[in-house]
Amino acid sequence: MRQRQALTVPRMVVALTALLLAASPGPAPLSFAEALALAERAPLPAATARAVVSQRAEASRVSSLSNPQLVVEPGWRRSATAGSGPDLRVGVAQPFHLSGLGAARGEAVRWETQALSQEARAALLARRLSIAEAWLSLWAAEQAQARAAEEVRLAGAFREVVESAAALGAATKLDVAEAATYVAEARLTELDVQGVAAARRAELSRQVGALQAVPVTAAGPLPEVALPAESRWTALREQAANLPEVTARRSQARAERARADEAKAARGLQLQLGVAALREYDGAVGGVATVGLTPPVFDHAERERSTLLANAARLEGEGQEAAAAAASGLALAFHEVEHSHEVVEVLRGTLLPGAEEAARLGELLFRAADTTVLEVVRLRRALTHARIRLGQALADEALARMRARLLIDALEASAP
């Protein structure tokens, strides 16, 4: 009962979040955890999950026996001595495959179920990665939008200072024109990042499976992701072949070969046992036993096996390609964790403090008539660019860590 309640709570949260997204007239705040929880409700992951349930339900009822055959043979016979009358023969026969069809069918079903289950896991993992990227991209775009709006406000205030200085004769018309140009360029930057944010919102709506673009905003802080120690990364890279995309291809190949074995067993040696009841035209009744044997002389299911084995060979090649891609992808994910962290450290520890100090000193020098408007504009643009770049770098670092975490979780779930 406690386990059922534990499973119900996340589903209620996901359902409530989806309802709020659909019903909210304005931008709906969506945290990273809420967005990631919606992955299971997206059309493709949800459909593959239902497919697994449906396949398992039907597979559990698969029989190892073929259907019996019922034969009814009505007739009419006439004899000079006994007269005439109807004949009737009713029989039932049950075929038995002596070539292991039941075991081959069970093996095929097992691999089909495993392949479909791995496909469902791969679809869910891919959607979680896509949603994580979409949410973090939206977060970075909204941070850039906020920084651009702040820059527009500061540019307007700076233009007023320059105009006041020009009225007092402390600034030239060129200075006023440069300050006005700075305001216009800041506004254009704001419009650009607004367009980017709108595109990111539409992408996040698509990834969570909304039937139409839902206005959302990336609410809450960036996700905090814990990763294993770097000493374990090499061992994890060696396990990349256990990721769902790879195991799905391998299971599909095994399923195709199992289906080929099933087709061959279905054309194997077959024994038919049956009984028949007789009623002859003269009123006599009786019964007979029937025995039939179908040897695999000509047809060994070559037609069916040729296609199945060809598909198996192709899927095995795809599995090898997927394994190589998974290994390189996991290695790249670990590299991105380190690289993105270094970028954030440089931006936050060196570039941004330097840009802030330079912009502050530049404005002080301008007020003291020791520098030009153009130099102040250049320093402020550099500061805005550094702030926007830091927001993007923070999102990139969070995405790198989340991507590595999701891949590691998928590996651990696939561990024997």
Image (cartoon, rainbow, N blue to C red):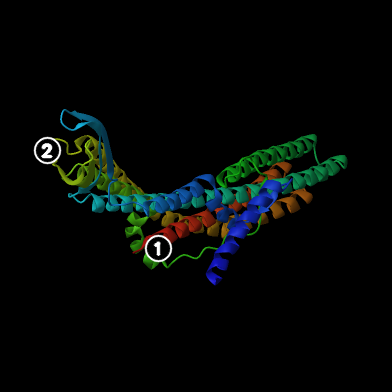
Image quarter (top left, top right, bottom left or bottom right) of the N terminus: bottom right
Tag 1, which secondary structure?
helix
At which x and y percent is residue 242? Answer: 35, 56
Q: Residue at x 54, y 60 (%)?
A: 345
Tag 2, which secondary structure?
loop
The numbered dot on residue 18 is none
Q: Is residue 227 visible?
A: yes
Q: Residue at x 45, y 48 (%)?
A: 51
Image vertical order of residue 259 relative to residue 390, above or below: above
The numbered dot on residue 412 is 1
Q: Nearer the viewer, residue 103 or 330?
A: 103
Q: Amino acid at mark 1?
A: Glu
Q: Nearer the viewer, residue 82 or 274?
A: 82
Q: Residue at x 40, y 53 (%)?
A: 56
At which x and y percent is residue 329? Answer: 39, 51
Which residue is label 2 attached to? Answer: 297
| Label 1, label 2: how far apart the Cα atoms are | 49 Å
At which x and y percent is residue 40? Answer: 53, 52
Q: Residue furthest right?
A: 168
Q: Is residue 227 left or right of residue 254?
A: right
Q: Is residue 195 left or right of residue 273?
A: right
Q: Residue furthest left?
A: 297
Q: Is residue 342 visible?
A: no
Earlier-in-chain disc, 1 versus 2: 2
